[in-house]
């Protein structure tokens, strides 16, 4: 039976990088059917809603979505549509690979191949108890960590290690200071790690982790951490290997998974054909792994690497003079 996925073209450079990505997937003969759905500004203009029920239904039905960046207008009722999607589908695992690629003006053009697994639903971002005192001088919020939330994300990281033949999981925390919240996360992580004797587990305090990442990123394999630390660390990792144009991400839950580029809508270059489609393409590769097509995912990544190596039709952010579709055609031609 043909697998159908939900495709959200998005805002800003979204439609351009999605067109490029679908072109490459066509050449890869992935055999997927697409159900197009709207969210963000595009949806607001068509339906008057930022996240229409039809889009939610489509994701619920297909369980897998490929999504371009979205604009969340101020006053639209959500602080962020992406956060809203994560909440509604309980997409608890944010999975962000960072890998060295050639010719990307990166600090580490080789040697880095790590994945950050970030808890996506609780911690400092649970938005609970946000209060500002009447005089506006004192702000408080609740950082909630649960055994359930910690256990499922750490288990996800260890299962990912097993599934992908990776050897080491680093648990990143700040339990020496945040004794209750980070302390619980670390305690649960140790319990889970004990059930995976075949995978090495080490622990690192978040500040030391940041220093180590900048000095010797090649020592990392999988990093698992809480929401706030994961948000910061995964951007740091994207910076190590060439920036946002090459950073994909997956948001994975039990019932649905959404694959995307990490960057935003880049309104400064929208409509100009300058956008680098690699981040969304690499998100599509994660999706193919998730859909049980690892061979296709590997071929796609190899074609991207070969195109970068040949400096064929690279977009301006990579120092080239190509455009989005020319770059996509160059990648498709190597499949
Ligand atoms: P948003 O408000 O949607 O987050 P933004 O412009 O604040 O948009 P990004 O979209 O992440 O944030 O862009 C940050 C910078 O990186 C911009 O200068 C943008 O042009 C550039 N950029 C982002 N994505 C790409 C891409 N795929 N290709 C080339 N440049 C990109």
Image: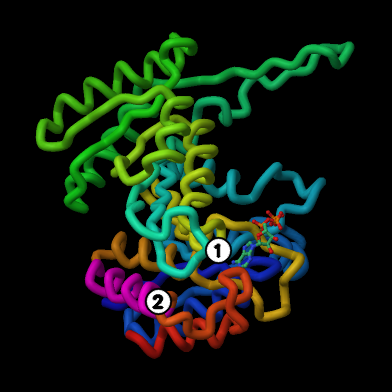
Q: Mainly helix, strand or loop, the magenta region?
A: helix
Please tell me which residue lies in front, 228 or 238: 238
Q: CA distance from mark 1 to mark 2?
A: 16 Å
Quadrant that contains the C terminus:
bottom left
Q: Secondary structure at mark 2?
A: helix
The residue positioned 41% from the left and 22% from the top of the image is 205
Residue 298 in the magenta stretch? The answer is yes
Instruction: Please report the residue visible at 17 percent of the width from the left and 51 percent of the height from the top.
Output: 165
Q: Can residue 332 be seen by looking at this rendering?
A: yes
Q: Is residue 57 visible?
A: no
**Residue 142, horizontal then vertical, whole percent:** 59, 18
Residue beneath disc 2: 309
The residue at label 1 has a CB less than 8 Å from ligand 1: yes
Viewed as shown, does residue 107 lie left or right of 184?
A: right
Residue 55 in percent (x, y) is at 57, 62
Query: Are there few (<14), some (14-19), or many (20+) residues within 10 Å of tag 1?
Result: many
Question: Which quarter of the picture shows residue 281?
Answer: bottom left
**On screen, 239 above or below 104?**
above
Quadrant occupied by the N terminus: bottom left
The quadrant of the picture showing ligand 1 is bottom right
Which colour scheme appears in the figure?
A: rainbow
Dot 1 or dot 2: first in sequence order is 1
Numbered tag placed on residue 42 in the rendering: none
| Residue that carries the numbered disc 1 in the rendered image | 245
User: Magenta part of the protein: which range?
Assistant: 293-307
Q: Quadrant of residue 173?
A: top left
Q: What secondary structure is found at the residue carrying circle 1?
A: helix
């Amino acid at each position: 039976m043909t697998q159908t996925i939900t495709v959200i073209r998005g805002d800003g450079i979204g439609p351009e990088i999605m067109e490029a990505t679908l072109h490459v997937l066509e050449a890869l003969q992935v055999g997927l059917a697409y159900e197009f759905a709207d969210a963000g500004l595009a949806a607001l203009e068509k339906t008057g809603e930022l996240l229409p029920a039809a889009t939610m239904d489509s994701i619920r039905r297909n369980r897998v979505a490929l999504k371009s960046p979205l604009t969340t207008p101020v006053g639209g009722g959500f602080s962020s549509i992406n956060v809203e999607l994560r909440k509604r589908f309980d997409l608890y695992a944010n999975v962000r690979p960072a890998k060295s690629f050639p010719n990307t003006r990166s600090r580490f053009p080789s040697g880095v191949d790590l994945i950050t697994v970030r808890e996506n639903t609780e911690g400092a971002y649970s938005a609970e108890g946000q209060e500002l005192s009447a005089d506006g001088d004192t702000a408080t919020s609740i950082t909630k960590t649960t055994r359930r939330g910690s256990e499922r994300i750490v288990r996800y990281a260890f299962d990912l290690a097993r599934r992908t033949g990776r050897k080491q999981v680093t648990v990143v925390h700040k339990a020496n200071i945040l004794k209750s919240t980070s302390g619980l996360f670390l305690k649960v992580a140790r319990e889970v790690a004990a059930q995976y004797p075949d995978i090495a587990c080490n622990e690192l305090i978040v500040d030391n982790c940041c220093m180590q990442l900048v000095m010797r990123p090649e020592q990392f394999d999988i990093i698992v951490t809480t929401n706030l630390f994961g948000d910061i660390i995964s951007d740091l990792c994207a910076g190590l290997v060439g920036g946002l144009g090459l950073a994909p991400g997956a948001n994975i839950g039990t019932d649905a998974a959404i694959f995307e580029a990490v960057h935003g809508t880049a309104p400064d270059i929208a409509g100009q054909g300058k956008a680098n489609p690699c981040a969304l393409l690499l998100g599509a590769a994660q999706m193919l792994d998730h859909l049980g097509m690892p061979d296709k995912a590997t071929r796609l990544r190899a074609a991207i690497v070969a195109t970068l190596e040949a400096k064929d039709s690279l977009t301006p952010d990579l120092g080239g003079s190509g455009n989005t579709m020319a770059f996509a055609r160059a990648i498709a031609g190597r499949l």
